[in-house]
Image (tube, rainbow, N blue to C red):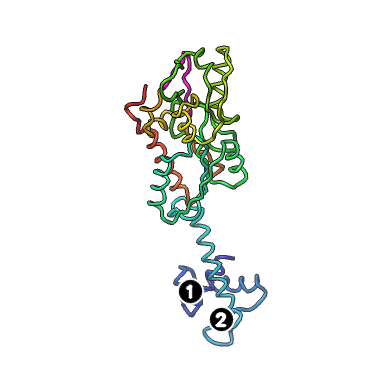
Amino acid sequence: MLEDLRALVEFARAGSIAGAADRLFRTPSAITRQLQRLEAALGAELLDRSVKPPRLNALGSKVLEQARDLLQRAEALKSLTSSDAEPHGVLRIGLTHPLAVGTMTEPIRALTEKYPQVRLQLLSEGGGNLRSRLLAGELDVAVVVLPVGTTAPPPLVTKIVATDRVEIVRGGAGDVDGDWTSLGRAPWVLNPPGCFLRASLLDHMERAGFTPMIAAEIHNVHLQLAFVQSGYGLGLLPASFVARNNALGTVEVLRPPSFDLRMSVAIVRAGQLGALEKAVRLLEDGIRDVFEVADPRTPA
């Protein structure tokens, strides 16, 4: 029906069937058939054929208004689903807690500066909640951390954009060394249960014969770092985060034997995003740049 409505609009614009045919690169008989088909579909005559050339009757003029609106909406839908279109609309981004840090403003601001018609909605939650929101259609993409070599479960689609080392850090002077015995006696500031980084640390300590003392469970990495710097406990933090917060002068990295913990930074989605695809690709590039700009003071 859309093409028949287009024929009606062009007929009104040109003032004749021949003129509409020229505008649509069709024959006059083809335009006539389209108008007749539209009238049959609507169950009413739209043209006054008592005059030559025919013209829209009163009902036809009302249908014309609706036809123009429908065609505009159809074009908007095509633009929304076309990956070649200029990105526009709302982009809903989820950030897992370890990545809800100040440096993420850089790629996000770059996105909105390049594509000013994109409006962002940001949400920070645990990785499991973000995946549930993606599957429920409540988010478009989620920026998450995953164990190296893994992906989000299907039907979600995962794109790994960076990797980062995760360090054990202590604040200020203390009697904690980089051996499991010393680490087993110290208090810890960690993510709440459900974090695979925490789970990996606990697994290493348990295999070494120690059960860590959890002094604080905090989602926010900035607050974790502040507690570590104050000497409240040891922390487990991404190396890039520690370096970019100029914290290497206030915390010390401890590396016990056989402990080499790394994480993948990934963008996870449930499907294609049409006109927002370019914006998501720019976000991927920006996040990759954030992690590739390594601080030379970070231990290798």
- Which residue type carries mark 1? Ala
Label 1 belongs to which residue? 20
Where residue 139 sits: x, y (%)?
56, 46
Q: Residue furthest bottom?
A: 51
Residue 65 located left or right of residue 253: right
- The residue segment tinted magenta is 253-264
- Is residue 107 found inside the magenta-colored segment of the image? no
Disc 1 crowd, CA 10 A, few/some/many (<14, 14-19, 20+): many
Mark found first going from the N terminus, 1 or 2: 1
Element type at marker 2?
Answer: strand
> Residue at (50%, 55%) from the top-left corner?
80
Where residue 146 sits: x, y (%)?
52, 30
Q: Pointer 1 and pointer 2: residues touching (CB < 8 Å)?
A: no
Tally the marks: 2
Asked if 89 appears above or below 97 in the picture, the reply is below
> In 3D space, how far apart are the residues under numbered discs 1 and 2 (Cα atoms)?
13 Å
Label 2 belongs to which residue? 56
Where residue 241 sits: x, y (%)?
42, 32
**Label 1 vs label 2, nearer the camera:** 2
